[in-house]
Image (cartoon, rainbow, N blue to C red):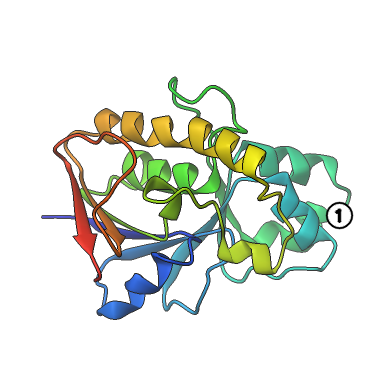
Amino acid sequence: MAKVIHVIGNGPLGAPLYNKSPRKGLKLGCNVLPFAVDNVYGTVIADFKMMKAITAGELTVPGDWILGFRPKLWSERTAGFLMKFGIQIKEFYLTLPKYAPTYTDFNCGHLAVHYACNKLKGTEVHMYGFDSIFEFDMRSTTDFVIESDRGSQNTLRLADNWRPIWTQMFKEFPEIDFKLHHNHKNIRIPVPDNVEIIVGQ
């Protein structure tokens, strides 16, 4: 029996497609969900900047959290953080695949999808809002709540670092069917046969 997992990223083009149809299965969010989603299993957080904003009270992330390596460091080094927010931490997920050079290169979307595959053992993983796989566009709905560097040089660096990781991740889990939801099929990376692009839905 298929175990369906929906991973909702922050790309403003693809994320809204999640709302096109009722979605059965487990739901994971990245950073800050761009809209309300019922029965979210957890929100995945990978970056120091998210932890800083949460700690400063600039940002509220409801529900349970799955925290990566850098948020774990933050939680250990920041006085009072675990006392205040520890109840929301479902678990720490510290896996860094060999094809990801550093934790900095392994972004929140990577972490969430890898967690869905490796820890939750999904057999069908749907991905929404992973716009940078299809576009030369690193915009994120998280930018509305946390300022990020989206200059051309940083965008190029992020695209060059992030995109190859996706190809390797899809190859790491050949038994999993990946369903990438976007508004066109012009993907910017090579993908194996277990990846399907679903347009407009």
Q: Residues within 10 Å of mark 1 (few under 14, many from 20)?
A: few
Which picture quadrant has residue 76? top right
> In the displayed structure, would residue 191 be above or below residue 149?
above
Q: Where is residue 107 in the image (x, y as percent from the top left)?
A: 54, 42
**Which residue is farthest front?**
152
**Compared with residue 98, is residue 160 higher up or lower down, i.e. above or below?**
below
Q: Position of residue 175 (x, y in %)?
A: 16, 37
The quadrant of the picture occupied by the C terminus is: bottom left
- Residue at (65, 38) in percent of width and height: 153
Of the pair 121 and 97, the residue shown nearer to us: 97
The residue that disc 1 covers is: 80
Relative to 23, 160 lies left or right = right
Relative side of 152 to 127, left or right: right
- Amino acid type at circle 1 is Gly
Q: Name the residue at the right extreme.
A: 79
x and y percent of residue 182 in the render? 31, 61
Q: Which residue is drawn at 70% across and 57% down?
A: 86
Residue at the spot 43% in from the left edge and 22% down from the top edge:
99
Quadrant containing the N terminus is bottom left
Question: Left of 9 or right of it: where is 74?
Answer: right
* Nearest the eye: 124 or 19: 19
In terms of secondary structure, where does tag 1 sit? loop
- Side of 167 where 108 appears, left or right: right
Note whether 175 is above or below 151 in the view shown. Answer: above
The count of marks equals 1
Q: Where does residue 158 sit, x and y in percent of width and height?
A: 56, 38
